[in-house]
Image: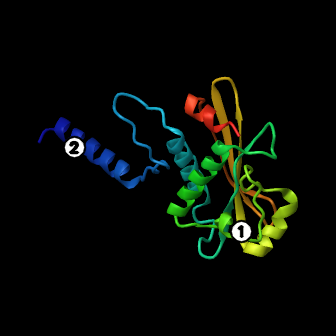
């Protein structure tokens, strides 16, 4: 073996050792894209991706067993006392993703001692948080809001610890305001 081949062999072995010893972090969540470019996710896909990001943020910080999360309907930023079918559906999609990840989600519709106003969903009001926490042993509330512009809808989701009101996970995202989404924004 000549000197040049030995040098190349040593350089190759060094590169393999260095790159083999370093572990590159896996991005989370992993979303596969087709080779011809990114695609636009639908509402459910966007909600799942946002929920996955929140779940990643609380991994290892939140004990799943016995700690319940109360999903609240997402509310319109322009009138925080109201929600729409869009807000209720978005809440359900986030709740489903948390359930799939193993978290205990409290189904408020099955409880008789919490009043649900027709058309308003499970709105979380500050004065009710302590009563809800104590009555149902709820650790956190999954809440959110949205606001529309002419062509987009902007959504903000938070997981709020009830004991002290601290946000322990959050995500913001937006999507095109399609005709289908517009129909879900009508009360």
Nearest to the observer: residue 24 or residue 181: 181
Can residue 65 be seen in the rendering of this structure?
A: yes
Name the residue beneath numbered marker 1: 139
Give the number of marks.
Answer: 2
As drawn, 160 above or below 12 = below
Proximity of marks 2 and 1: CB atoms separated by less than 8 Å: no
Nearest to the observer: residue 48 or residue 44: 44
Instruction: Assess disc 1: are there few (<14), some (14-19) or many (≥20) residues with their C-alpha within 10 Å of its C-alpha.
Output: many
As drawn, 28 above or below 39 = below
Residue 130: where, in percent of width, then height? 84, 67
Q: Within the image, what quadrant is residue 173 found in?
A: top right
* Residue pictured at 67% horizontal, 48% vertical: 157
Q: Within the image, what quadrant is residue 152 found in?
A: top right
Q: Secondary structure at mark 1?
A: strand
Nearest to the observer: residue 6 or residue 162: 162
Instruction: Indicate the quadrant containing the C terminus: top left, top right, bottom left or bottom right.
Output: top right
Instruction: Assess disc 2: are there few (<14), some (14-19) or many (≥20) residues with their C-alpha within 10 Å of its C-alpha.
Output: few
Can residue 174 be seen in the rendering of this structure?
A: no
* Residue pictured at 13% horizontal, 38% vertical: 2
**Separation of marks 2 and 1 at Cα, in angstroms:** 58 Å
Residue 115: where, in percent of width, then height? 78, 63
Q: Secondary structure at mark 2?
A: helix
Q: Earlier in the sequence, mark 2 or mark 1?
A: 2
Instruction: Indicate the quadrant containing the N terminus: top left, top right, bottom left or bottom right.
Output: top left
- From the viewer's perspective, tell me whether residue 151 is left or right of residue 82: left
* Residue pictured at 88% horizontal, 60% vertical: 127
> What label does residue 9 carry, if any?
2
Q: According to the image, what is the colour scheme of the structure?
A: rainbow
Observer-side mark, 2 or 1, equals 1
């Amino acid at each position: 073996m000549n000197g040049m081949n030995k040098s190349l062999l040593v350089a190759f072995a060094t590169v393999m050792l260095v790159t083999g010893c370093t572990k590159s972090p896996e991005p989370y969540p992993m979303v596969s894209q087709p080779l011809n470019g990114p695609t636009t996710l639908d509402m459910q896909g966007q909600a799942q991706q946002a929920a996955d990001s929140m779940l990643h943020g609380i991994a290892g910080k939140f004990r799943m067993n016995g700690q319940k999360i109360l999903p609240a309907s997402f509310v319109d930023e322009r009138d925080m006392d109201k929600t729409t079918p869009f807000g209720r559906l978005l809440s359900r999609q986030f709740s489903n993703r948390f359930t799939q990840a193993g978290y205990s989600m409290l189904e408020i519709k099955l409880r008789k001692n919490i009043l649900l106003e027709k058309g308003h969903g499970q709105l979380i009001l500050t004065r009710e948080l302590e009563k809800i926490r104590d009555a149902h042993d709820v650790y956190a509330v999954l809440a959110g809001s949205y606001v529309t512009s002419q062509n987009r809808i902007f959504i903000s989701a938070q997981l709020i610890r009830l004991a002290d009101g601290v946000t322990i996970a959050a995500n913001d995202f937006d999507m095109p305001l399609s005709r289908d989404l517009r129909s879900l924004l009508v009360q």
